[in-house]
Each structure stands twice: as structure tokens, then as C-alpha cells.
Image: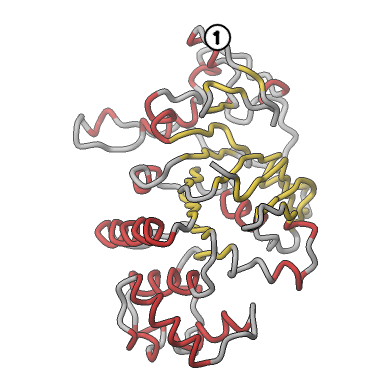
Amino acid sequence: MNPLIEIKNLTIDFVLNNGILRACDNVSFTINKGEIIGVIGESGSGKSTLASGILNLVQAPGKISSGEVYYYTENNEKVNLLKLNKNDLNNYRWSEISTVFQAAQNALNPVLRIEEHFLETVYAHTDKMSNEEILKKAEKVLSYVRLDKSVLEYYPHQLSGGMKQRVLIALSLILDPKVILLDEPTTALDVITQWYILDLLKQIHNDLGITLIFLTHDISVISGVIDRIAVMYAGEIVEYGKVEDVFNETSHPYTKGLLDAIPTLHDDITKRKAIPGSPPNLIQDFKECKFSPRCYMYLNEECDGDKKKTEALYKVNGNQCTRCYKYGELTSKEIVKEGA
């Protein structure tokens, strides 16, 4: 598969009064054309910050300290989005890379009708469409998400939570993007609506060939939709690979902890258990593996939590890599260091 977005050593810091918080720590991975990627992790793991970094929308006191984000155009031209000025970057936002923001309740302006949201969105990125053309296209993309064109006349407060989420998805489609970033697209929705939204997105992916990137804390919701999965913890990618490989042969203790916490219909719910402890305070100089205080291998003295060794990813197989350097020793596998 051909690459679409290539993230290399992306580091994002927030300069605070009591220190520097590193929300994304040397993150590297590639998103291929036409696939569905899931970025999974607890709240505070760095998922939303990563999305902001990809779009170059990090706000003060945050800053992109280092790294590159390359976008491959239809002509296979490699463009570093972080090097573009505001006007040039605006040519890629929404027309090439769009986003569905977290919390639909807050993302829509309460004093604007839905049609005005479409008009403002398009005019913010191009002046090549008339009002009539925009509204005609808006009716078309609303039909993709199974909403009637009458919704254009509504104010956000007249819509249910699921309808607002679908309006946001329609807004993300208005300029025919190649990739959509979806930040917690099913948060605050009931279970039935969650699956309805995911079904819509899968259909849009199949019909239009749009690459989708899900950012969520709920691994169980999107596991049946995504092709590959990146697991984030404390600002780092700790495991990355095809979803079936990661599920069938988990290579990092954090991923194993996430999977062990998911209730299933096949066993006793009392056997499910949460990961002990809490995510670390990122305003600190880590001396050991970031996950070590919560890791069963470290707590059982099976691992020394060498921080230096966790600064690289290790290839498990052709499709999977891990940050856990002990995995190869415990499974009698020879894993290959690839670098962060």
C-alpha cells in the first residue's frame, strides 16, 4: 500500500509554570492510502494532541518541538505540513485532511443554522463555490449520513446528539477530503447510536475510499472496524500493527491490560480487571520505563524497566512492532530494533 501520511519523530511540548509537559514523545508511524487506523489510549495519553500536531493546530502553551508530518499528494509529491505557512496549509486542511472534533455538543455554533456551518466551512478554505453549489453539495453529504436536507434549516439545539455527530461527519466530507481524523467520534452517545455512527463511517470509507483515523479510548468499539492499530501511552506509541496481530499476539503489557479490561459475552465478567494505578504525571524526567509502575512484569521483577531501551520500537514481525524490549526474551523471539 502507498503511504498517505508519514509522521516522523513528532514531539509536542506544553510549557507550563511548573515544568514542560511532553504530550507527544517522538511519535513515528505511517498511514497508508485507503486504510482505517485506530489510535487507542487512556485519556491523557496524547491522542488529541497527536491529531492537532498532524493538522499543525497545536495552540499555546503547546508547541511542536521537533519532527515532521509528510502528506503525499495525488501526484505522490511529499509535502511537510509543518513547514507550510498558514495560507498554504489552509489549502490542505479540509480539502485534503478534514477532522471530526470531539464533543459534537460543543463543536457546532449554537446561534448558526446548519446551512451556515456548511457555508462558513467552505468559504474558510476556498472561494470557488457559490452558495447554491455549497448547499447542493451539503444536501448530498447529509444524505451520506442519512439525514434529510431539511436539517440545513435547523439550529444545533434542535438536533439529537447522534444527529449532531452525523452533521459533523457531513461537514468533514464537504470538500471531498482524502483522509478524515475522527477524535472520539462516539463519545457521549448511547451504544446503539455508536454502532450506527461506525456503520455509517465504514460505508463512507467503502463508497468513497476515504482514509479514516480513529482516536479513541474505547478499544472495544472500533476493534471490528479498523485495519491497523496504534496504542498510545504517556505520549508514546507502545505497540503498532495489524489489529488481528495485536489482538492475537499482544506484545506490550499496556495493550494486554487494555484487552483484559474489556467485558465479553464469553466469560465471567468478574474475571475482567482494570490496569492498576494511574497514568503518570508527564511533567517529570522519567528514569525508568513510563509504564513500569503499572506493569506486571516490572512489579514481578521480571524486567528492570530500562528507560534507554524503551526509547526505540522493536519489530515483532513484518506487520507489528512494540516498545517492550522484554517481549522477545519472554517469548523466545528475536525482535529487531527499528528506532523510535
What colour scheme does the image use?
secondary structure
Local packing at callout 1 (Cα closer than 10 Å; few below 14, some 14-19, many 20+) is: few
| Left or right of 327 on screen, residue 202 | left
| Left or right of 222 on screen, residue 338 | right
Q: Position of residue 288 (x, y in %)?
A: 68, 24
- Residue nearest the observer in this picture, 291 or 336: 336
Under circle 1, the secondary element is: helix
**Residue at image location 60% in from the left, 55% down from the top:** 51
**Residue at image location 73% in from the left, 38% down from the top:** 284
Image quadrant holding the C terminus, namely top right
Residue 32 vertical position relative to residue 62 in the rendered view, above or below? above
Q: Position of residue 160 (x, y in %)?
A: 32, 76
Residue 304 vertical position relative to residue 76 in the rendered view, above or below? above
Q: Position of residue 4 (x, y in %)?
A: 60, 50
Q: Which residue is mark 1?
A: 329
- Residue nearest the observer in this picture, 293 or 336: 336
**Residue at image location 62% in from the left, 58% down from the top:** 74
Residue 22 vertical position relative to residue 277 in the rendered view, above or below? below
| Rendering quarter of residue 123 | bottom right
Residue lying farthest to the top in this orientation:
332
| Rendering quarter of residue 247 | top left
Q: Position of residue 304 (x, y in %)?
A: 63, 14
| Left or right of 90 on screen, residue 137 | left
| Number of disc labels | 1
**Residue at image location 34% in from the left, 80% down from the top:** 159
Instruction: Give the amino acid type for the residue marked by disc 1 in the picture.
Output: Glu
Residue 264 vertical position relative to residue 197 in the rendered view, above or below? above
